[in-house]
Amino acid sequence: MTDKLTIALAQLNPTVGDFQGNLDRLREARKAAAEAGADLMLTSELYVCGYPPEDLVLKPMFIDSVRAAVTVFARETADGGPAVLLGAPWRGDDGRVYNAMLLIEDGAIAAERYKVDLPNYGVFDEKRVFAAGEMPGPVAFKGVRIGIPVCEDIWTPDVVECIAETGGEILLVPNGSPFELGKTDQRQQLGVARVVESGLPLVYLNQLGGQDELVFDGASFVLNADRTLAWQMPAWREKVAITHWSKKDGAWVCAPGETVAVETGDASLYQALICGVRDYVNKNGFKGVLIGMSGGIDSALSAAVAVDALGPDRVHCVMMPSPYTSRESLEDAAEASRLLGVKLDEINIGPAMGAFSEMLAPFFEGTNSDITEENIQSRSRGMTLMALSNKFGYMVLSTGNKSEMSVGYATLYGDMCGGYNVLKDVYKMSVFALCRWRNERRPSGALGPEGAVMPERIITKPPSAELRPDQKDEDSLPPYPVLDAILEDLIENVTPIADIVAKGYDPETVLKVWRLLDRAEYKRRQAPPGVKVTLKAFGRDRRYPLTNAFHGAYMASPVSKAAE
């Protein structure tokens, strides 16, 4: 039995399905940990295959391939280096597949522990693919009894209580916890609660990186039994932390180490967007991104994030003016592109508009120009971008924000066209705030330039789709401060309409927003994926049927009856 222990915490960025690449990254981390004298290395939840693997877990070949890769890796630990607590989807002796942590030591798998509490809400569908483990006791390592609750297992007291009651001495918690605004504090509060209840120190190790819509911020930490913060690892950056532990008066204590400030507010939101774009583009092997640069605020912010994520050489912007495009928009698109250092081309969609007008004239005879012609403009731009994407291999990055996606203020196969949408879960008022924030500072790790990345006029001018003369967004929508506040209540908080009206909002405005939100589900279902940053992102968290005859929330009047 030892009274000293050195534990390496591997906050790494795995790729789903890339067993070899993930393990090679872990090999490098283990080598560094060995040089630092580590006894044990902890990985994040399901590190071998990346998190979340979703329905890949249902493929027997996938599980067999994981076992084969882990078996090879396990043999390598006979080299005298640190043991590894490795996250993997694992078929147990009973034939069922578990979300497992494997203690790999001296060339073999010495112990297995299975996740008990499988989340089945929001973005999580673990009950769909995994069997739940039995209540776990600790594993013995060098005479130390280590508890390994996995992620959701610490969101309630039961699993940690079981570990404590069966002699656990240290809690090592592997996580695949996606980023949401404000979640860092929530995690630490949960950690403190489990420490207080159990009297045991706790290591919270989180995954890093982007996986489709989800981004994982890392921000791992260590709490001692007295609730003091011994380590705070950085967010948004890979790191292997070497933590030193000693037994004092019968209890294990982690020596104080690095405690860095974790980004909050707009800084954390911007980093999440960078992470989502960078990993989606790089992990899927795209050369770069293609952006329709309109001279408006959404495309300007999307371009800034893309440049910070990928560098200016991998971002290609295209201005596609129509007869309704203002001189200001042309100038602003050019200036934003210059500030970012990106290539900007111009392709006039006037000829496409003319061709469609001529082609459809016999069928539209006797009708008035309306949203049909507006949508033809938008779809001409979408077709242009997709042609460039097909020809040159750049992925189209669409630019619509959450406010627009919520109310359907977007055109299918037009401005919704693209492979990924960086602002899909960002409300319009946050778009304004992020633009001001980025103009004032360059985020850590960003590949874009110092200083302002867009002209002030882009931020201050009234938003417009510029699909007809003198068009403004507020011709069709409530002012964005009002719209966003109502949408947040309807989407994130699921607030009854009557309660929203009671806050002082105009009843007809609230009902209009509700109707637009409800009726735009068919558009959102066809939208590209995008970075999830709020509690309820479209697609992953908020799922409504397309065919839906329940309209009770807005058919009745007055509002008091509509809310019943």
Image (cartoon, rainbow, N blue to C red):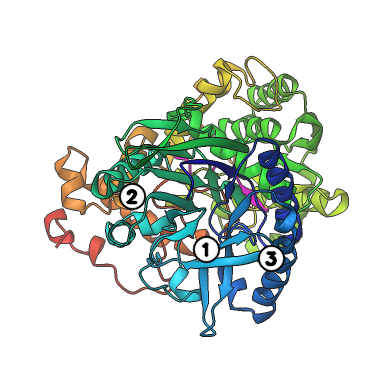
Mark 2 or mark 3: which is in front?
A: 3
**Is 2 left or right of 494, judged from the image as shown?**
right
- Whether 444 is drawn above or below 479: the answer is above
Instruction: Name the residue carrying label 3.
Output: 70
436 or 171: nearer the viewer: 171
Task: Give me the C-alpha separation between circle 2 and circle 3.
Answer: 40 Å
Q: Which mark is residue 525?
A: 1
Report the amino acid beneath label 1: Arg
Instruction: Name the residue carrying label 2.
Output: 492
Q: Give the class, few, some or many, for how many residues have Cα within 10 Å of label 2's Cα (few <14, many ≥20).
A: some
Q: Which residues are magenta?
A: 419-427
| Label 2 element class | loop
Report the amino acid beneath label 2: Glu
The picture places residue 17, in percent across and down from the top left corner, at: 69, 63
- The residue shown at (57%, 36%) is 241
* N-term-proximal mark, 2 vs 3: 3
530 or 347: nearer the viewer: 530
- Farthest bottom residue in view: 94
9 or 329: nearer the viewer: 9
| Label 1 element class | helix
- Farthest front residue in view: 1
Mark 1 or mark 2: which is in front?
A: 2
Task: Give me the C-alpha separation between circle 3 and circle 1.
Answer: 38 Å
